[in-house]
Image (cartoon, coloured by chain):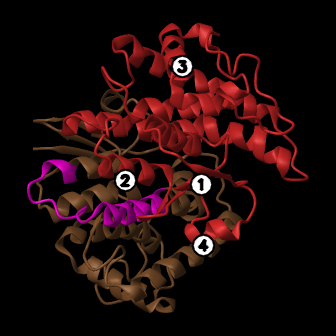
Chain colours: A brown, B red
Amino acid sequence: MPILYHFPLAPESRFVRLILGEYKSDLDLRICQPWERNDTLLKLNPAGELPVLDDASNGVYCGARVISEWVEEVRDDAFLLQGTAEERAEIRRLISWFDTKFTHEVGAPLFSERVTKRFVKGQSVSSDIIRAAVANAHIHLGYVNWLLSRHDWLAGDRLTLADLNAAAHLSVLDYFGDVAWDKYGDLKSWYMKMKSRPSFRPLLADRLVGMPPSKDYAELDF
Amino acid sequence: MPILYHFPLAPESRFVRLILGEYKSDLDLRICQPWERNDTLLKLNPAGELPVLDDASNGVYCGARVISEWVEEVRDDAFLLQGTAEERAEIRRLISWFDTKFTHEVGAPLFSERVTKRFVKGQSVSSDIIRAAVANAHIHLGYVNWLLSRHDWLAGDRLTLADLNAAAHLSVLDYFGDVAWDKYGDLKSWYMKMKSRPSFRPLLADRLVGMPPSKDYAELDF
């Protein structure tokens, strides 16, 4: 069975779990702490980063972007990166949006303050950084809401990798109750659809020790 | 003619110039300062990030990763992302290495200290940050040197997107004289080959006002 090395609350790891969940792939999930040196992981991925997919039969694939492109290339039933070259460019643009801009302005600072600093001794949490990141989030949420007011899914009229990646990123914010869903009607409807997918269920069951999720995190109707 | 919005010393912009240079595409190059708001750019790319390719006939493509995948999909003579799914995964792994790990640990802090802070008032340069980034660079250069001791090109036995992206990133360090080439024999031989390619020539002619390149920046034999 393929092994996925991941961290439950890391968006890149969640993105891959969602993709493989859509394809109903059986997975042996192994949790790694991103802030700890892990020699098993370093042997598989010299970058030391998550997620890593060890696909027993074919090889080792490092990083969400690499894994997502590889899965879409090798599966006969691939359906998450289809369409014309222009449509695929739009899907990849939205993946990059979350992987770079959103991560830089929102996801990474919140993860560092809310998660990493709890597990690394001697670091105090900055409420200024949290406030700034949550304020930045509004711009991103507004943009995604606007996209979703124009079509049913993020990149057009069907579910793609872009939806799974955006949902992976936003679900981490949602775990901490950092999304004011009621301000963004189309975004909220879309996220309800995403949460209802069988691929999403395992993510809704994730619990970080000592850090319970926000009240509505696992609710399909919120 | 397609228009490329770029910044001469940004590695993502250089990566795209190298790709299009390999295909001998005529380009209308427009320079944007990454630290200034630019309404033309924002209309094309709501992320406000470089590079952006406005390909008159087909559409607008935002970001080096999107542009590189799109070019490889639409060109009949594409040759930079070929091979089996496993070989393509290795090419993308090395692109991600530079785009995330290298950028985070080396490229972005150096760019911020050496370039952005010169053009944004009231910011003082931190020699501690520069020292730390240059120290981090050694680990990356050693790893790339090791890869190049095993095969002629970064991802195997032929030139791929991975070589162009790595060279784009390293060329920015080289502009500032931050690479101790003589410590890395195989890396140096590879970089000499890269510099000798016609696609590289325009990059060697780049000059930032008030910030001349290191002595050997444009030398093919260094």
Judged from the image, the secondary structure of the residue bearing numbered disc 4 is helix
**In the rendered structure, the residue with mark 4 lies on which chain?**
B
Q: Residue at x 58, y 78 (%)?
A: A138
Mark 4 or mark 1, which has the lower sequence index?
Answer: 4
Rounded to the nearest whole Å, what is the CA distance between mark 3 and mark 2? 26 Å
**Between A45 and B166, the one nearer to me in the picture:** B166
Dot in front, 1 or 2: 2
Mark 3 or mark 2, which has the lower sequence index?
Answer: 2
Marks 4 and 1 on same chain: yes
**Between A88 and A24, the one nearer to me in the picture:** A88
Residue kind at label 3, given as amino acid type: Ser
Q: Residue at x 47, y 72 (%)?
A: A176
Write down the residue under mark 4: B43
Query: Viewed as shown, does residue A194 lie left or right of B118?
Result: left
**In the rendered structure, the residue with mark 1 lies on which chain?**
B
Q: Position of residue A45 (x, y in %)?
A: 35, 33
Kindly identify which numbered label has been placed on residue B187. none
Quadrant position of the C terminus of chain A in the picture: bottom left
Q: Residues within 10 Å of mark 3 (few under 14, many from 20)?
A: some
Is residue B24 positioned above or below B142 on the image? below
Residue kind at label 2, given as amino acid type: Trp
Rounded to the nearest whole Å, what is the CA distance between mark 4 and mark 1? 13 Å
Marks 4 and 3 on same chain: yes
Judged from the image, the secondary structure of the residue bearing numbered disc 3 is helix
Q: Residues within 10 Å of mark 2 (few under 14, many from 20)?
A: some
Write down the residue under mark 2: B70
Write down the residue under mark 1: B50
Q: Residue at x 84, y 49 (%)?
A: B119
Is residue B222 positioned above or below B83 on the image? above
Write down the residue under mark 3: B196
